[in-house]
C-alpha cells in the first residue's frame, strides 16, 4: 500500500477545512506551504538505496516549520478521535502500544493537505520508479507516555494483495526524531 496520492485536492483546489485547522497552514509563509504541492526529486542514489535496502530516510522532505504546524493540527485531530478511552493500566498490550486513527484525510484541514500532497506522492512514485502512486490508506499513530513497546505484529492484512510494489511514507511528527 502507498500512503500518498497523486490525486491532488479536487477540481476546485479545496483542501477541506472541516475543523478550521487550515488556518494554521494559511498563517505560515506561502513558500513553506507550497512545499506540499512541489514534487520531490528523488535522486538515482536514493532510488537505488530504496531498491536495495527496502527503506530510506529522506531528511528535509518537508520544511521544519511545516512539520511543526502539521504536528499540532494532526495531534489535535488524533486525540479528539482517540478510540481508546480506558486508562493505560486497563488496556491490553496492543491498545497500550499506541493511539491509531485511520482515514485522517476525511476530516479535512492539515491531515488532508498532507495525505494528498504532491510532495509525498512524487516521493513514493520516484522511489518505486513509477509514474504515480495510489493511496491505499492513511492513519495517525501516536505513542502515549507510559504505553510501552509496540508488540511484534504483521501489517500485511492492511496491504493490497495484488500489488507487487508498495511504499509506506511515515513523516515523523516527533520532536525527538534526529
Image: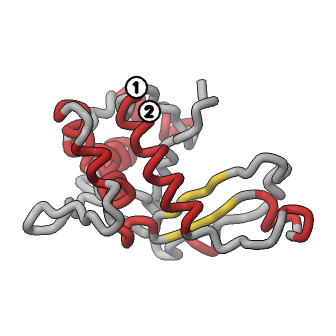
Give whichever of 46, 168 is nearer the camera. Answer: 168
Residue 152 has which mark?
A: none
Q: Can you identify the residue that label 2 sits on?
A: 48
- How packed mark 1 is, by other alpha carbons closer than 10 Å (few <14, some 14-19, many 20 or more), is few
- Residue 157 placed where, x, y %? 63, 74
Label 2: state its secondary structure: helix
Q: Is residue 170 above or below residue 14?
A: above
Q: Say what secondary structure mark 1 lies in.
A: helix
Left/right of residue 10 with respect to residue 173 in the rendered view = left
> Who's the residue at 43% across and 59% down the image?
3
Residue 140 seen in render? yes
Residue 174: % across, % down: 58, 37
Residue at x-position 51% and y-position 32%: 57
Q: What residue appears at the point 37 percent right and 72 percent down from the top-left corner?
A: 106
Circles 1 and 2 in contact, beta carbons < 8 Å: yes
Reply above or below: 166 against 40. Answer: below
What whole-number distance in Å separates the C-alpha atoms at marks 1 and 2?
Answer: 5 Å
| Residue at 83 percent of width and 66 percent of height | 87
Amino acid at each position: 500500500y502507498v500512503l500518498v496520492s497523486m490525486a491532488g485536492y479536487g477540481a476546485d483546489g479545496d483542501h477541506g477545512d472541516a475543523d478550521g485547522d487550515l488556518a494554521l497552514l494559511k498563517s505560515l509563509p506561502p513558500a513553506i506551504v507550497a512545499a506540499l504541492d512541489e514534487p520531490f526529486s528523488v535522486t538515482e542514489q536514493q532510488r537505488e538505496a530504496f531498491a536495495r535496502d527496502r527503506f530510506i530516510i529522506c531528511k528535509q522532505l518537508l520544511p521544519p516549520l511545516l512539520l511543526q504546524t502539521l504536528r499540532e493540527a494532526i495531534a489535535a485531530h488524533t486525540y479528539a478521535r482517540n478510540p481508546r478511552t480506558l486508562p493505560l493500566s486497563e488496556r491490553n498490550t496492543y491498545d497500550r502500544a499506541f493511539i491509531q486513527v485511520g482515514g485522517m484525510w476525511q476530516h479535512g484541514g492539515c491531515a488532508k493537505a498532507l495525505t494528498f500532497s504532491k510532495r509525498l506522492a512524487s516521493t513514493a512514485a520516484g522511489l518505486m520508479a513509477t509514474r504515480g502512486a495510489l493511496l491505499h490508506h492513511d492513519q495517525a499513530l501516536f505513542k502515549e507516555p507510559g504505553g510501552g513497546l509496540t508488540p511484534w505484529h504483521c501489517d500485511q492484512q492492511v496491504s493490497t494483495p495484488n500489488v507487487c510494489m508498495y511504499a509506506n511514507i511515515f513523516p515523523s511528527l516527533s520532536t525527538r526524531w534526529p
